[in-house]
């Protein structure tokens, strides 16, 4: 394990319109000791050839090809397994990082001795231009508080693998696998530290899963009942709090 290397995992499926811009935001980072693991997941557009070119132009970019369309959790887990760095970050293939994201988040984690960190982010339009709608984050988040607020956005997360093993962060193969994964890590006793500064633009497109609000409601409810096995009454309380905060985030 390279103690100064940040491994970045990017699952990619039919992202020909966006992936080059997302990769460019990695290459522009002020912190340059990174590896980018692109996990191609059975795309049917020009994504595979674009990824081949990107990997061929920079030795820090590695390409993994999944056999079959397995979804984001399988793709991220393949990237996690291949990671060689002490630190691991995620970036979705349509999101954008600001230039100092890695440098400042790494410094923050070292200062706090944090095993798990996440940052604020801004909603962007289809062109990844900020809309002014920013999701602020708390200084700390434990399992109990996280259940009623899904403020941890995947493209903002960084782990210190010296303190959180890969086995703990592998994502379950369920819907909203990222949220379920954060809860699993927090439930183990790890505290997540928030950086209340925007480093990520979350591009909202017509294909964004979270843009389907009914589906989002269904998923969070299923996580409470089927993943976390919480009681009906407690699930109702948490669900109400989650729904309120979800609405406020988008105002």
Image: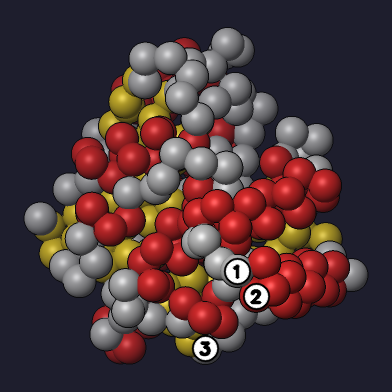
- Whole-Å distance between the Cαs marked 3 and 1? 28 Å
Circle 3 packing at 10 Å, graded few (<14), some (14-19), many (20+), is: few
92 horizontally vs 159: left or right: right
- Whole-Å distance between the Cαs marked 3 and 2? 25 Å
189 horizontally vs 201: left or right: left
Identify the residue at horizontal 46%, vertical 66% (top origin): 183
Identify the residue at horizontal 43%, vertical 52% (top origin): 90
57 horizontally vs 240: left or right: left
Mark number, residue 139: 3
Q: Would you say residue 191 is visible in this rendering?
A: yes
Instruction: Identify the residue under disc 2.
Output: 234
Q: Position of residue 63 (x, y in %)?
A: 32, 27
Identify the residue at horizontal 73%, vertical 49% (top origin): 218
Instruction: Identify the residue under disc 1.
Output: 231
State the residue in front, 57 or 236: 236
Chain-order first, disc 3 or disc 1: 3
Q: Would you say residue 120 is visible in this rendering?
A: no
Tell whether label 1 touches label 3 (CB within 8 Å): no
């Amino acid at each position: 394990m390279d103690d100064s290397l940040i491994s970045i995992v990017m699952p990619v499926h039919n992202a020909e319109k966006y992936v080059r811009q997302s990769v460019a935001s990695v290459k522009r980072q002020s912190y340059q000791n990174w590896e980018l693991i692109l996990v191609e997941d059975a795309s049917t557009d020009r994504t595979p050839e674009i990824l081949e070119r990107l990997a061929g132009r920079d030795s820090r970019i590695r390409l993994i090809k999944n056999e079959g369309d397995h979804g984001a959790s399988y793709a991220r887990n393949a990237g996690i397994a291949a990671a060689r760095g002490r630190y691991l970050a995620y970036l979705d293939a349509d999101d954008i990082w600001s230039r100092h994201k890695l440098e400042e988040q790494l410094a923050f984690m070292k200062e706090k001795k944090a095993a798990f960190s996440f940052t604020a982010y801004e909603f962007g339009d289809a062109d990844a231009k900020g809309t002014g709608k920013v999701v602020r984050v708390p200084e700390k988040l434990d399992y109990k508080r996280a259940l009623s607020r899904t403020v941890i956005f995947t493209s903002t997360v960084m782990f210190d693998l010296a303190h959180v093993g890969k086995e703990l962060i592998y994502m379950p193969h369920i819907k909203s696998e990222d949220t379920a994964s954060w809860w699993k890590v927090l439930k183990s006793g790890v505290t997540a530290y928030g950086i209340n500064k925007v480093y990520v633009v979350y591009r909202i497109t017509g294909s964004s899963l979270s843009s389907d609000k009914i589906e989002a409601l269904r998923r969070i409810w299923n996580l409470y009942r089927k993943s976390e096995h919480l009681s009906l009454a407690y699930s109702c309380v948490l669900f109400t709090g989650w729904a309120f905060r979800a609405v406020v985030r988008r105002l």
